[in-house]
């Protein structure tokens, strides 16, 4: 049985999907790292307790770490809004994209639009990772 030809730009889309998903995991790690750093600096948690918290939050759904940050380690408003937007986009990607996109992709439709959205998710992820890292470093510097 022959495999039908891939729709135009399908490989590029697949690569962008993979990148967006991988960077989503990295954002979760950055969020968990920020939370552990915040707890270490503000609550005086031990290194061991902070590492345990980090490990706990990287193994849970992203919403768990975001909820914990909302409750205990507030972010600046503009960064918080970006985190919440990223969460919505990432959730769409991992939970709804396939069902939404499949009818379009089999007809070779909307591929450029989906590529652009994946690139937007990846770009926001890169921004968030850097911003969370910078915020964590500022917390450590202020706490010492």
Image (cartoon, rainbow, N blue to C red):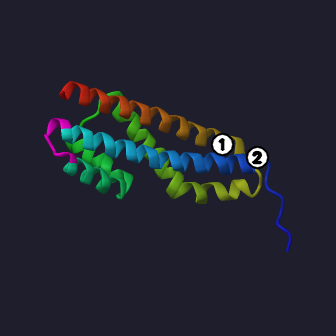
Residue found at x 23% / y 47%: 50
Query: Would you call the spot at circle 1 few (<14 residues within 10 Å), some (14-19), or many (20 or more)?
Result: some
Residue 57 in the image: state x and y as whole percent: 31, 53
Residue found at x 63% / y 38%: 116
Dot 1 corresponds to which residue? 115
In the foreground, 76 or 39: 39
Q: Secondary structure at mark 1?
A: helix
Q: Secondary structure at mark 2?
A: loop
Is residue 70 positioned above or below 61 on the image? above
In the foreground, 104 or 11: 11
Is residue 53 positioned above or below 86 on the image? below
Does residue 39 appear to the left or right of 15 in the view shown?
left
In the rendered structure, find residue 10 and report the number of the disc placed on it. Answer: none
Can residue 108 be seen here?
yes
The mark that comes first in sequence, 2 or 1, is: 2
Dot 2 corresponds to which residue? 9
Residue found at x 71% / y 54%: 105
Q: Is residue 45 magenta?
A: yes
Is residue 107 positioned above or below 129 on the image? below
Looking at the rendered structure, the number of numbered marks drawn on it comes to 2
Q: From which residue to which does the magenta span run?
A: 41-47
From the image, which quarter does the C terminus lie in? top left
Residue projecting furthest to the left: 44
Residue 32 in the image: state x and y as whole percent: 33, 46
Disc 2 and disc 1 in contact, CB within 8 angstroms: yes
Residue projecting furthest to the bottom: 1
Residue 74 in the image: state x and y as whole percent: 24, 36
**Distance (Cα) linking label 2 and label 1:** 9 Å
Is residue 141 positioned above or below 83 on the image? above
Query: Would you call the spot at circle 2 few (<14 residues within 10 Å), some (14-19), or many (20 or more)?
Result: few
């Amino acid at each position: 049985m022959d495999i039908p030809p891939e729709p135009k730009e399908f490989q590029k889309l697949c690569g962008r999907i993979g990148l967006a998903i991988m960077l989503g995991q990295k954002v979760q790690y950055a969020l968990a790292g920020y939370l552990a750093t915040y707890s270490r600096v503000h609550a005086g948690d031990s290194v061991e307790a902070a590492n345990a918290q980090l490990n706990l939050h990287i193994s849970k759904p992203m919403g768990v770490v975001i909820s914990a940050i909302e409750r205990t380690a507030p972010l600046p408003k503009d960064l918080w809004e970006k985190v919440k937007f990223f969460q919505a986009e990432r959730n769409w990607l991992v939970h709804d994209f396939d069902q939404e996109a499949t009818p379009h992709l089999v007809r070779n439709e909307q591929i450029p639009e989906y590529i652009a959205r994946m690139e937007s998710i990846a770009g926001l992820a890169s921004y968030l990772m850097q911003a969370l890292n910078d915020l964590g470093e500022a917390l450590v510097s202020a706490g010492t």
